[in-house]
Amino acid sequence: MQSKTTRRSFVKGLAATGLLGGLGMWRAPVWAVTSPGQPNVLTGTDFDLYIGELPVNITGAARTAMAINGSLPGPILRWREGDTVTLRVRNRLKQDTSIHWHGIILPANMDGVPGLSFHGIAPDGMYEYKFKVHQNGTYWYHSHSGFQEQVGVYGALVIDAKDPEPFTYDRDYVVMLSDWTDEDPARVMSKLKKQSDYYNFHKRTVGDFVDDVSEKGWSAAVADRKMWAEMKMSPTDLADVSGHTYTYLMNGQAPNGNWTGIFKPGEKIRLRFINGSAMTYFDVRIPGLKMTVVAADGQYVKPVSIDEFRIAVAETYDVIVEPENEQAYTIFAQSMDRTGYSRGTLAVREGLQAPVPAVDPRPLISMSDMGMDHGSMGGMDHGSMAGMDHSKMAGMDHGSMAGMDHSK
């Protein structure tokens, strides 16, 4: 349901939000308690969200972000399975906006994707979302308009289960990973459309070729270069945009910001990892701590103990960790192409930090990474194809193939 909101009502709303936050009235009830060090948490069934511009300085240069309720990322929304929630989203931008509830089961006109039973939210407009919550778990919400998600319109969404969960924990943290660029995201996209490896600053050199010749021989090294050149691809182009352009964030903080989650030794800590980036895959580990994965994309999984996991764009993973002493632990999330990382700390108090690992060696893309198993072609007798009479194929009525149903 769309309506207009005045600038005065917007300012009043922000003032009320700040006042309530200061009074602690937005704090979670007992069943949804989180620990300090998180973005603002809004709970209940009735929410007012405001999307507007926000001055930021993430890299040392002043920029303008777009934010929800004046924070980047936006507030954590905490719902309860079985409740009906109402969310009034007001637009204070000079362009249309929207909020999409990623992974949530709801009616199409509540999904928040412009063009899908929804026209978006016009400047100075308001849209009221109202739907019943049919699930639980870790999710997120974000704009589905232009490049607004890349510049800050996103936040975490936690839905508490109505029934006991199959695991226990003492503390609960959201760890939202994202990527930020000072460059206009529209310009980034424009450059990529003109040259897909525009931001790849790790192209192979003459020195790399000499090394390959020494290791594989001249013919193999030349054949490898020829193959990639014919595909118009580069084995070093793992990510469309790298850490030379992106700054990787953890809960909105750059690596030197050192987001910190507090714990007491012996506690079980639930970490809700969300990849809210525009295009970055992260490899996540916590040196010195095993992680037990208990949920993926909001769904319970059979618990599995791991040292590291890869999280793709828009995925969520819930893990349990159990630090047994008072040392600090680094949450280390390096980009898949190893050009940068985001990081935070688990510690018994603010101000502590553990050593930050060096990023791993930069990998190269292989054919198997792209799903091409050229090795399986080795047993083919290509010579036997020489005797095929291809001239007899000339009479085939290729036009008759137009009606084939390739979907089957």
Image (cartoon, rainbow, N blue to C red):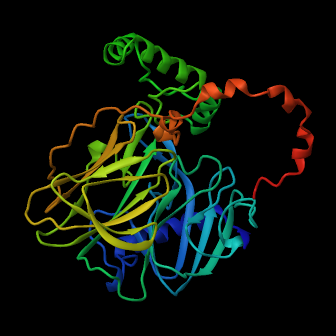
Residue at 82% of width from left, 55% of height from top? Answer: 405
Q: Can residue 181 be seen in this view?
A: no
Q: How many marks?
A: 0
Residue at 43% of width from left, 18% of height from top? Answer: 220
Q: In this view, does 210 lie above or below 195?
A: above
Q: Is residue 310 above or below residue 219?
A: below
Q: Position of residue 207 (x, y in %)?
A: 35, 12
From the viewer's perspective, tell me whether residue 243 is left or right of residue 183: left
Q: Is residue 330 visible?
A: yes
Q: Nearer the viewer, residue 379 or 122?
A: 379
Q: Position of residue 281 (x, y in %)?
A: 43, 46
Q: Where is residue 14 in the image (x, y as percent from the top left)?
A: 51, 65
Looking at the rendered image, the quarter that the N terminus falls into is: bottom right
Residue at 44% of width from left, 13% of height from top? Answer: 219
Looking at the rendered image, the quarter that the C terminus falls into is: bottom right
Residue at 91% of width from left, 33% of height from top? Answer: 395
From the viewer's perspective, tell me whether residue 73 is left or right of residue 175: right
From the viewer's perspective, tell me whether residue 1 is left or right of residue 362: right
Q: Where is residue 368 in the image (x, y as percent from the top left)?
A: 46, 39
Q: Is residue 236 above or below residue 264?
A: above
When asked about the image quadrant of residue 124, the answer is bottom right
